[in-house]
Image (tube, coloured by chain):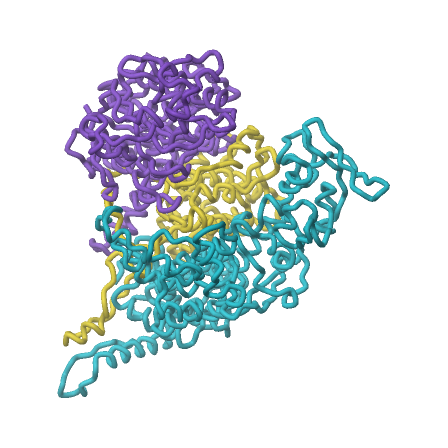
Amino acid sequence: MTLTLRFTRNLGRWPLVPLSALMSLSLSLSLLALSAPVSAQPGVDTQDVRAARRLLRRLSLDLWGAPPSLDALQSLEAWPTSDEQLSELLSDARASHWVTRFHEDLFWPALEIGDLINPAASLLLPATFYEGPLGGQQLFTLFTGLTRRGGLVPCLDQPAEWNEAGELVMEEQADGTLREGVVWVTPYWSEEPVKVCALESLAEEAGPGGVACDSFEGLASGFCGCGATLERCASIDSALTLLASFRAQVAQYASTHSAEGANYFELLTRSEEPVNGPIAHYYRHLASAAIDPVVLVAPITPDQLPSLDFSQQDEWRWAERAAPVHSGLLTSTPFLLRFQTARARANRVSQALLCEPFIASNGVLPSPEDECSQEPNLRLRCGCADCHARLEPLSAHWARFSDAGALYLDPERFPSYLASCAACADGGACPDVCRRFYVSEAPTEAHRDYLGVLKAYEWRSPDELERLEAGPRAQVSDALERGALSLCLTRQLFERLVGYAPQGDALARARGYAVEFAERGSMPLLMRRLLQDPSYQLESPTLWGRPTQGVSP
Amino acid sequence: MSATTSLSRRALLAHMVEAVGLSQIAPSTLNTLLCGREQGRAWAQASTSPRARYLLYLHFDGGWDLLLGLDPRDPADFPDADAPVTGVEPGYQRLPPRFSRSPIDVGPFKLGPCGAPLAPWAERLALVRGIDMGTLTHEVGRRYLNTGRSPAGVSAQGVSISSFAAANLTGEHLIPHLAHRFESYHLDLPSEASALNVASVDHLQYLLQETLGLPSYAPAHLRGALNRYWAKQSEAYEARWAALPSGEAHARSLDELRKTLALRARARELVTASLHESFQFNADAQATLRAHYQLNPQQLDTPSGRAALAAQALKTGLSRVVSLTLVDGLDTHDGQWANDHSARLEQGFVALSQLLDDLSQSPAPDGQSALLDQTMIVVTSEFSRTPRLNARGGRDHHLANASLLIGGGVRGGQVFGETSPRFMGPLKVNLETGRGDPSGSPIRPQELMVTALATLGLNPPTQVRAEPLSALLT
Amino acid sequence: MSALQSKAPARLMTLLSSVLISSLLSSGCEEARRVTLSPEPPRAGSLAGGADEAGEAAGGSAGAEAAGVEAPEPVIKPRAPRRLTIAQLARSIEVVTGGLRWLEDLGQGPVDMLELLAPTLGAPDYRGVTHENLEPSLLLSKFVQDGAQRVCEAWVARDRDPALSAHTLVELSTSSEGWVSREPRHVKANLERLLLVFFAYSAQGSLLGDSEVDDPRVSALYELFELVSAASPSDPTGDAWLAVCLALMTDPEFVMY
């Protein structure tokens, strides 16, 4: 049976129906056609085993990243894109290939060690790093070397000694540094003991002046040590494991919400975060010292963290995040650290999830001496307004998450106005918190209005303030409501699978899939629609698909 | 005349044909595969006719000291002791004994003590002084010069001059754009503009060999049969495609498939052209090259080694654009400035001199002139160093920069632009004459880029807004 | 899976382990390409990697209907072929050979070359490279040929081992002479099987059926087989299957789908 979408306007026979109704009628019929046997598709001969094998190759490469086996090809008897077959392909563990790749292409999950920890305070380096091939394998941190040993140096490669008073013996060296010996410790990242400088093996609770040892200042003081199992520090290997874990966290979000029965869009709105062993360890022990320049506070409180060992890299649990405005993957640590300003985050969402990129005009920028170029509000500045008129309101959704970090600016700890930060602008040095988070400089008169105000609030209109309080979730629900989110994702998937952006009739079909996707929230269903779409199924005649393949219709 | 092998274009093609064994292919297909004819023109053609057809972009990394090199001051006029007043502290006394204690007069201008190796080339050098970098950040300065556009933060904007040139210059080159430890940006340019970036001077020899030079057991007779199979397959594809309706529907797919087929043959050419021998710098066959560049076979990763790489790439016809970092380690904020910076800067200028010598003695592929006369060479650093020494006996970053333009289409033996005598700030100049003029304009990196492109007969990318410095052009 | 035990200069290992080669390059034999001097802004809805050929059109048949024109039957534009990513290429080699990868021993144990070269060949790291460029590339062609040579040598060596239980290159059920057979029916049956596993291509005609119509792709490969085996001084069958493997792995459709 072939359904032909053929309408003629004949006022005598058809009632006058508004265009929108006609369009939605045609879309519904398109959907009906697709739920009918796939053989209904024009141009696609579903009885052709040869074409079916070629389709299986495409499916296998697209979904699993590998071609089908000889067995699978030889045993193929039916057109491979029935609902049942596709469900099987999509739910197979190998389908993580397309899920991971698609979402990594959207969210660019690549962090560096310096994004997560302070390399000078918390990174245990082997002595060969500093002293060259002649150094031993003892591990040390740079700040401890600087503050306690008097240079960026490790300890001596000999057993550490303590005097009768129980104090660690540090010997003066020819180069003026003071060095202690090594101890063997079994670190959290390994079952084998490692050689570590004795100062790094300390497990103090507090440093000089009572500074807490689970803080940057504590670690940097050199008096705290890395802990009994070196839990407060990271080796290069354990740091790389952390990086891999945060990358895999994105895949976890994606695979959970791309599964049958899951609501896909909760990927972008849910309050929980998937945590494995290394991430749990990081939040528990390492995050608090990640400062300068990155500011980070673990989004999950210790009582909510799963009790997983560092070695449990492949075990994932969902854990509730503390702040009220978390928004799925969009406020996850890897996303916030990869896109480190509110504008960058808003831009990424706009581009990747809404297909609404910011395009600057090609015209000549006005001269910097021009009065218009002095306008401090980017929404109004000529040459900038093109993009910033839209970008600034969107960035408001993220403004409660600090720049250069993944810190939620809790309104209690970070009120919208701090008088002390306004006061320090006019004389005296401003404390760190003011310089970092509050407007404490006024280069122009217009800026003076904002002195003491949280930087996140600078230049914000009332509408933007609402978005600010609502958080990124509001941007997602708005986009979902107007259909932009589902349509953008659908079009991107269409283009990945079919090789070109949908146009004409294909676009109409894609819009239909997007509407259904928005309503049902099912990624497997969307993928089935796309894989059953004739544009995917019909092979290009430029390839040597079949021996007697004719010309395309 | 250098004893290194110089292959004329025709000889190279003939060699390739023989080696590849494509004698059974129809001439038209052969032409298509080997691009026997030079086709096309530079789309971005400027009104001046091009003098240069090749581009070398040589970067001195870290910020070079102009007092030691391109913009010296005479200690007689600027004694070190008067530095607080003059803002200039040449510090020549601190250099190792082999360096001159005063600027070196090379004829049309003077160079600092480290510039001695460039003296023989003074008439070919166009020295641009007083370039206003507007930044003291390494990445920003480097990328500004590289693209002619002020970076967004530290992120480069637009395309690099080398990629742009590679895209718009014509000719038959297996690796049109070669790079060594230098960034390139090729947003929206065709893929042949992308740089092949080699990590080390002697890497290219492996890339140019079959199976990376590792022993392979495929018997020789197999090759001819496989080539024949390839050729027949290409014909069979064309026959299939001829039956398709013409039009846009499959145009892109056909283009990609044809390109894939063509590249398959080209990849064979790459490994059968024996080009790798020209890059085996420690082989006996390259003894003359090594002697010219004074290369230690065990230590090729020196400025001279890199210069040799660039020269070979042009001389063998492998590339039309080479961009590389010639010298590292110039960012001397501490007391090692006196020994290390001077030594490295001198090494860089020695390498440059060896390169100019090599190119001036090598014929261009078309045999019309020396290769140097057809090559545009741009020599830059991301900014300069403070004219005063700091508390540690080193120099920090400084805004005023200088650059050398050398080669085809450049009017050498002159200075364009200047820095203020005291404090060495970049001065506004008359952009026609290059003379200081308070009501003139600063020389910015984009002027430099546009001028270099003009010698190649190219207009710059639209978002680089500047005019070429015509006084520097022939 | 076997790795070729080749001893390469140690510095090759250093070279490849510190590779900074970061771009694809392609050197098409064509006229100077038109340069988009002012980069075209990305069209809303198209990814950086893809490009819609004809731009967006509104509406389709519903739009035509509004104008009162009889809507034509929807014309289906077929899928556009695309190149494999490096990850897909590596898996493809593994699947068709029954487990082999392009490995080299550069002095520190076998190294997976495609993994090593992935950044060079454009695989994204999501920092400097956020999108895998799938354009035809000279460097990829060159490395595919290098890899094909090494993998095919290993495959022939492994497959001809009589102790092997499952032969993936030369299946023996159609031969009475074992692995070294040059019998046409046996060779062609194997070629059909290889075309199926490499390209999911079903050969025209069937040797087991009534007609002996030769598929053109099978014929072309058979001709290659014959040529090489006839000219081989010492190992006709081995050389010939090596040639066939190379032909299949350097086929444009091995890297496209």
Quadrant of res A150: top right
Q: Residue at x 25, y 38 (%)?
A: C30
Mark yes or no: residue B310 visible.
yes
Image quarter in which the C terminus of chain C is found: bottom left
Of all chains in the rendering, the one displayed in purple is B
Mark yes or no: residue B308 visible.
no
Of all chains in the rendering, the one displayed in yellow is C
Front in this rendered view, residue A452 or B154: A452
Q: Residue at x 43, y 40 (%)?
A: C22
Front in this rendered view, residue C211 or A258: A258
Can you give x and y, in whole percent of width and height, for residue A317 in the image? 61, 66
Q: Is residue C74 left or right of residue B141?
A: left
Front in this rendered view, residue B378 or C18: B378
Total numbered badges shown on the rendered structure: 0
Is C61 drawn above or below residue C96 in the view shown?
below
Quadrant of res B245: bottom left
Is A413 drawn above or below residue B428 in the view shown?
below
Q: Residue at x 31, y 44 (%)?
A: B158
Can you give x and y, in whole percent of width and height, for residue B262 in the image? 32, 40
Q: Residue at x 30, y 60 (%)?
A: A379
Most distant residue in the right direction: A164
Image quarter in which the N terminus of chain C is found: top right
Of all chains in the rendering, the one displayed in cyan is A
